């Protein structure tokens, strides 16, 4: 979700469980949204996985007694002394099972979401002895929280410098590389590629439900989050895999000053969940139905198929195309099914966010990502009823405009 990224500038949808009908449907609860409710797909709230977790029943239940886990400290065997050993174990085990990132030789730093780790990393890699703050860049369209995460405290160490494509200063810089990218799902590498650059790889979405896993990545600084991996955004657990021990130590110092560690309750809950995912995900296509990534990938693929089918029939909107790639995890040739749809209104005049707002669908304007308002980001990770309502509204947007020159083909 990303703190301000999710909360700022969005109205709460009135479609809370209090004002909707619900009915049990075996795997989960289906809400029936009033047809005039506001659908909030502005934020990336990963609630679509609820049905899977309901099916898991008590397998992820963690009981913590009143006398347990009182201490600030979790371990004396790790420079990150507030990292629960069980969480470290399950993080390593999950990356090993999926094959998306190397963990041998890396220090793991846990954070309250990867949002807190973004701040820790900025502090850790910025030069401490320079008269001017180091520039922080990311290629547009970039994750809309980067500018505000960088500038919120008006640090003297680092400063947001915008789109990496336009960065032409001959001086050190920090580049955030998000891959697959939020908002457009594209696999990315650094764009500045100059001496003195520090690259931070934000791999929040490098999981099999969103994209083919083409290699086990071993960059110097990699950020992950339970929010997008398993959908447990409310637990607020992120982790950084850091090669350089000095950088890891500085991140840990930031965390100590900022929050003296990370909630043990959250860490233990996520440790359990990641271990359940790791144990269940070793065989893709297992008949037990306990492979989280298989559930997630099938659900995302179905949503993308529905969305593409509708968009194909009109000249009004376009969606990015993704190449077919071999996924080392599933063993299949597959396309990406990103967490967000990066929709472009064909008519250059359109303000895509406003267009959807007129149909009570909240989406995020391309402007917020350093792009133009002809684009909008739509979350594909909401609940089934929200997605279904979105599809209905999109169909009516297209029908309403079909009298225009846009038309449905
Ligand atoms: C690319 C990216 N990085 C980081 C985050 C932060 O996630 P969290 O703080 O929930 O771990 C998000 C959330 O939307 C994201 O999209």
Image (spheres, rainbow, N blue to C red):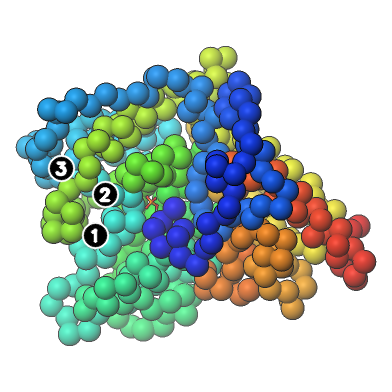
Q: Is mark 2 within 8 Å of ligand 1?
A: yes
Q: How many numbered discs?
A: 3
Q: Report if residue 165 is visible in the image.
A: yes
Say if 152 sits above or below 408 in the image. below
Q: Which mark is residue 140?
A: none
Return the disc, 3 or 2, that comes first in the chain's sequence.
Answer: 3
Circle 1: element type: helix
The residue beneath circle 3 is 82
Spatial separation of the CA atoms under disc 3 and disc 2: 10 Å
Judge the density around disc 2: few (<14), some (14-19), many (≥20) Cα neighbours within 10 Å: many
Judge the density around disc 1: few (<14), some (14-19), many (≥20) Cα neighbours within 10 Å: many
> Could you tell me which residue is drawn at 38 percent across and 78 percent down?
161
> Could you tell me which residue is drawn at 41 percent across and 50 percent down?
203
Say which of 121 and 22 sits in front.
22
Say if 384 sits above or below 8 in the image. above
Say if 401 sits above or below 298 in the image. below
Say which of 266 and 102 sits in front.
266
Mark 2 touching mark 1, by CB under 8 A? yes
Return the disc, 2 or 1, that comes first in the chain's sequence.
Answer: 2
Viewed as shown, does residue 230 lie left or right of 255?
right
Which residue sits furthest front?
19
Judge the density around disc 3: few (<14), some (14-19), many (≥20) Cα neighbours within 10 Å: many
Q: Quadrant of residue 257?
A: bottom left
Mark 3 touching mark 2, by CB under 8 A? no
Which residue sits furthest top?
287
Spatial separation of the CA atoms under disc 1 and disc 3: 15 Å
Q: Report if residue 334 is visible in the image.
A: no
Q: Position of residue 341 (x, y in %)?
A: 63, 54
The residue beneath circle 2 is 111
Q: Position of residue 144 (x, y in %)?
A: 47, 66
Circle 2: element type: strand
The residue beneath circle 1 is 120
């Amino acid at each position: 979700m990303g703190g301000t990224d999710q909360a700022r500038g969005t109205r709460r949808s009135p479609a809370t469980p209090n004002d909707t009908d619900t009915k049990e449907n075996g795997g989960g609860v289906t809400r029936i949204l009033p047809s005039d409710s506001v659908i909030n797909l502005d934020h990336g709230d990963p609630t679509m996985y609820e049905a899977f977790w309901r099916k898991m029943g008590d397998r992820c239940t963690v009981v913590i007694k009143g006398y347990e886990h009182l201490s600030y400290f979790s371990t004396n065997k790790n420079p990150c002394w507030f990292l629960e050993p069980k969480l470290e174990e399950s993080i390593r085990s999950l990356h090993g099972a999926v094959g998306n990132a190397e963990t041998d030789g890396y220090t793991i730093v846990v954070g309250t979401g990867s949002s807190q780790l973004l701040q820790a990393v900025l502090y850790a890699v910025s030069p401490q002895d320079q008269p001017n703050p180091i520039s922080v860049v990311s290629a547009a369209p970039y994750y809309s929280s980067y500018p505000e995460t960088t500038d919120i405290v008006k640090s003297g160490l680092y400063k947001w410098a915008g789109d990496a494509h336009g960065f032409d200063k001959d001086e050190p810089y920090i580049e955030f590389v998000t891959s697959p990218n939020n908002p457009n799902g594209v696999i990315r590498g650094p764009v500045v590629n100059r001496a003195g650059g520090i690259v931070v790889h934000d791999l929040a979405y490098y999981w099999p439900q969103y994209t083919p896993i083409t290699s086990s990545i071993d960059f110097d600084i990699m950020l992950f989050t339970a929010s997008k991996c398993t959908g447990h955004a409310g637990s607020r657990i992120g982790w950084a895999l850091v090669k350089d021990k000095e950088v890891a130590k500085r991140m840990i110092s930031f965390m100590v000053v900022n929050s003296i560690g990370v909630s043990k309750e959250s860490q233990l809950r996520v440790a359990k969940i990641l271990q359940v995912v790791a144990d269940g995900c070793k065989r893709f296509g297992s008949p037990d139905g306990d492979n989280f990534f298989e559930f997630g990938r099938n659900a995302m693929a179905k949503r993308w198929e529905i969305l593409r089918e509708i968009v194909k029939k009109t000249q009004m909107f376009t969606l990015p195309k993704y190449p077919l790639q071999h996924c080392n995890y599933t063993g299949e040739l597959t396309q990406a099914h990103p967490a967000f749809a990066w929709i472009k209104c064909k008519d250059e005049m359109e303000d895509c966010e406003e267009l959807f707002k007129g149909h009570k669908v909240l989406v995020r304007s391309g402007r917020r990502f350093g792009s133009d308002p002809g684009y909008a980001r739509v979350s594909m990770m909401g609940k089934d009823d929200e997605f279904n309502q979105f599809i209905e509204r999109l169909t009516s947007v297209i029908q309403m405009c079909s009298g225009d020159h846009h038309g449905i083909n």
